[in-house]
Image: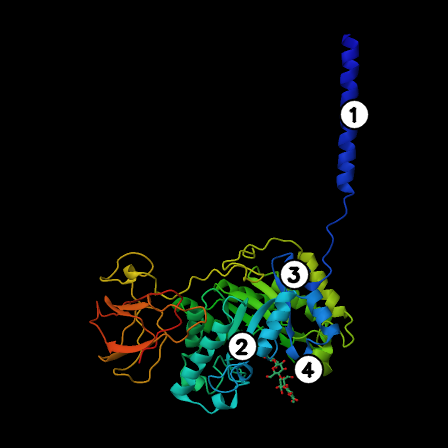
Amino acid sequence: MLKKTKKTALLLKLVSMALLIVMIQSLLTLPAMAAATTLGAAAAQSGRYFGTAISNGKLGDSAYTTIAAREFNMVTPENELKIDATEPQQNVFSFTAGDSILNWATSHGLKMRGHTLAWHSQQPGWMQSLTGTALRNAMINHIQKVMAHYVGKLAAWDVVNEAYADDGTQNRRQSNLQATGNDWIEVAFRTADAVEPGVRLCYNDYNIENWSAAKTQGVYNMVKDFKARGVPIDCVGFQTHFTGGSSLPSNFQTTLSSFAALGVDVALTEVDVTQANTTQYAGLTQACMNVARCIGITVWGVRDSDSWRASEAPLLFDGSGNKKAAYTSVLNVLNSVGGTPQPTNTLQPTNTSTQPVGPTLTRTPTQVVTTGPTATRTSTPTTGPSATPVPTTVGGGGCSPVTATITAPFTKDGAGTFCWQIATIPSYVNNWNNNSVTINGTNYTNIYVGSASLPAKINGFYYISYNGSFAWSHLEVR
Ligand code: G3I
């Protein structure tokens, strides 16, 4: 009997060992994780996107749309959201072409970046002829109206485009916008943030890929200053046009990581490379993959024939839609990164179903205006993030034409009249009854436009709170 039990135990041992060997063998012979076969899918493995510029006029070309829908998961309208396209006459807006691209993208599961709200180029004639306050106000109005149309629908906005000079200095570019005052860029960002705090707000430029370039340092210092002062900026777009002597700098990754260290996302927004050099394409892709806050790459067109510099054949598909060697070099880099977790790249929608692929936007909106009557401070607070009032001087007395977006407790030079305007009325706002602005305890209700004498300052400041049924756009102080 004992002998029989021993035999059975031995047999069981042998069987379980054999089973273990089979299991180990089958584990060892499991097929490797299949590499992704499209750019979008390959980038998505690390929580990033891979996008392309799209031209509305080409959406009827099935060869074009087949590649675009298959390969990419982000689009940027190439020209359709520029100022001349969206506001051809002052205060007359046209969204037909932009909407068409958005509809195409959405119906094919692609997200969209908006390009661009404030730019010295591609301004309509009426804007080119404006100067000073009139131009500043037109810029603000443009940002508000265009963004209001796309609220909740876009992944990002290039709020300001190409504002720095190409003269080997860190200076701003001379332009009619720059002539309205050096604060035009931050006013643009504050305006954009007031319309849609949840969308990624980007500064976008070219020839800022080389860390040693003065232009790069100029933009870097601006972003550093913005972050230090709470100007709402979420990302920097590196256009990455490698052409005309400009090619992949060996320090591109340093540039990306240095900007990222300031607390902004970075993205490659308009990539094209002379003759689609494979080494450069692989290198720029790798630079992005090596930086956790590099959220995605966009090439500036689908096929070479679609490019703004078609004669240089700078894209990933040839004119017949064939994948070029550069395509493979990019895909291989994306696949080599594969599912390597990117710390900040989890897809966490913060805004129902409309959030893009890419990392969560973590910026806390800087507007101090909060809801509810308790938002008004009646004494100097001693604790909390808003303990120290940040004065923003907004201009002279009277209703002189000074415009400011209120994002913090502010001081106003001299006595005078306080004028306000809730500038954007989104279509979804239909009830104004509960809207009110409180300035140092004085309540002003049912506002759209109006004016009043300023109440007394408290500790030298005006404290403003807003109680309403929608996120306000801006308060205009004159
Ligand atoms: O649509 C008209 C067409 O009706 C007309 O017959 C033709 C005649 O020239 O012009 C067409 O418009 C052109 C438009 O592209 C569409 O093809 C404009 O003249 C031309 O100026 C415009 O060029 C665009 C350029 O921005 C304008 O600045 C390019 O397509 C576009 O790729 C390029 O994109 C810029 C980014 O926005 C910012 N970074 C640099 C990048 C490359 O320049």
Amino acid type of the residue that numbered disc 3 sits on in the rendered structure? Ala
The residue that mark 2 highlights is: 116
Nearest-to-viewer mark from 4 and 2? 2
**Secondary element at image label 4:** loop
Residue 256 position in % (x across, y down): 56, 66
Distance between the Cα atoms at labels 2 and 3? 24 Å
Q: Is residue 326 left or right of residue 450?
A: right
The residue that mark 4 highlights is: 309
Query: Looking at the image, can residue 239 be seen?
Result: no
Q: Note whether ligand 1 is within 8 Å of mark 2.
A: yes
Is tag 2's residue or tag 1's residue first in the polypeptide sequence?
Answer: 1
**Secondary element at image label 1:** helix
Q: How many labels does the image show?
A: 4
Between 327 and 418, which is closer to the camera in this rendering?
418
Q: Note whether ligand 1 is within 8 Å of mark 3.
A: no
View extreme (bottom): residue: 129
Please tell me in which quarter of the rendered image ligand 1 is found: bottom right
Q: Which mark is residue 43?
A: 3
411 over 169 or under it: above or below? above
Distance between the Cα atoms at labels 2 and 1? 69 Å
Residue drawn at x 79%, y 15% is 7
Q: Which mark is residue 217?
A: none
Distance between the Cα atoms at labels 4 and 2? 20 Å
Q: In this view, does 96 lie to the left or right of 234?
A: right
View extreme (top): residue: 1
Q: Decide: few, some or many residues near mark 1? Use Cα within 10 Å; few <14, some 14-19, many ≥20.
A: few
Is tag 4's residue or tag 3's residue first in the polypeptide sequence?
Answer: 3
Q: In this view, does 381 lie to the left or right of 197?
A: left
Residue drawn at x 25%, y 80% is 417
Is tag 2's residue or tag 3's residue first in the polypeptide sequence?
Answer: 3
Amino acid type of the residue that numbered disc 1 sits on in the rendered structure? Val
The residue that mark 1 highlights is: 15
